[in-house]
Amino acid sequence: MGWEESHLHMFRIKDREYGPTYLDEELETLDESQFRIGDLMKPGDRAAYEYDFGDSWEHELAMEASTVADASTVYPACTAGEGYDPAHFDLAAATAAVASV
């Protein structure tokens, strides 16, 4: 099952709101497809992400670090992770999963 974009969402970064183009007229958001998060945030910055306006799932995003993309790497790529059992986290499987998005 892939991303179906069946719920509304919005990012709040430095007092500005970014979302899908169809929210622009209703909520006065900026078109998220016109921006890259790396251009809007720097390490140490925090942003808010609201998913599913009906249930209002609020998430805080923290940019911990950034780096220059490696021309020989396929992106997106998972660089690390953990789960219910960190000793069994499969980095290769996680990277394959994000590559299919």
Image (tube, grey):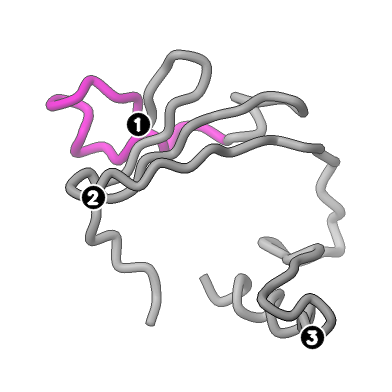
Q: Position of residue 60 (x, y in %)?
A: 53, 37
For discs 2 and 1, the disc positioned in front in the rendered view: 2
Q: Quadrant of residue 85?
A: bottom right
> How far apart, in angstroms, are the residues tagged by discs 2 and 1?
22 Å
**What residue is at 61 percent from the left and 27 percent from the top?**
46
Q: Reading the chain from its start, which is encountered first: label 2 or label 1? A: 1
Q: Secondary structure at mark 3?
A: helix
Above/below status of 57 relative to 10: below
**What residue is at 59 percent from the left and 24 percent from the top?**
40
Question: Dot 3 corresponds to which residue?
Answer: 88
Label 1 amino acid? Asp
Position of 81 with respect to 13 (left or right) is: right
Q: Quadrant of the N terminus?
A: bottom left
Q: Reading the chain from its start, which is encountered first: label 3 or label 2? A: 2
* Nearer-the-camera pick, 19 or 74: 19
Name, please, the residue furthest toward the left: 26
Q: Secondary structure at mark 1?
A: strand
Dot 2 surroundings within 10 Å: few (below 14), some, or many (20 or more)? few
Question: Dot 1 corresponds to which residue?
Answer: 31
Label 2 amino acid? Asp
Confirm whether the magenta stretch covers residue 77.
no
Question: Dot 2 corresponds to which residue?
Answer: 55
> How far apart, in angstroms, are the residues tagged by discs 3 and 2?
32 Å
> What residue range appears in magenta?
19-36
For discs 3 and 1, the disc positioned in front in the rendered view: 3
Labelled disc at residue 86: none
Dot 1 surroundings within 10 Å: few (below 14), some, or many (20 or more)? some
Q: Quadrant of residue 93?
A: bottom right
Label 3 amino acid? His
**What residue is at 22 percent from the left and 28 percent from the top?**
24
Q: Reading the chain from its start, which is encountered first: label 3 or label 1? A: 1
Q: Position of residue 21 (x, y in %)?
A: 26, 37
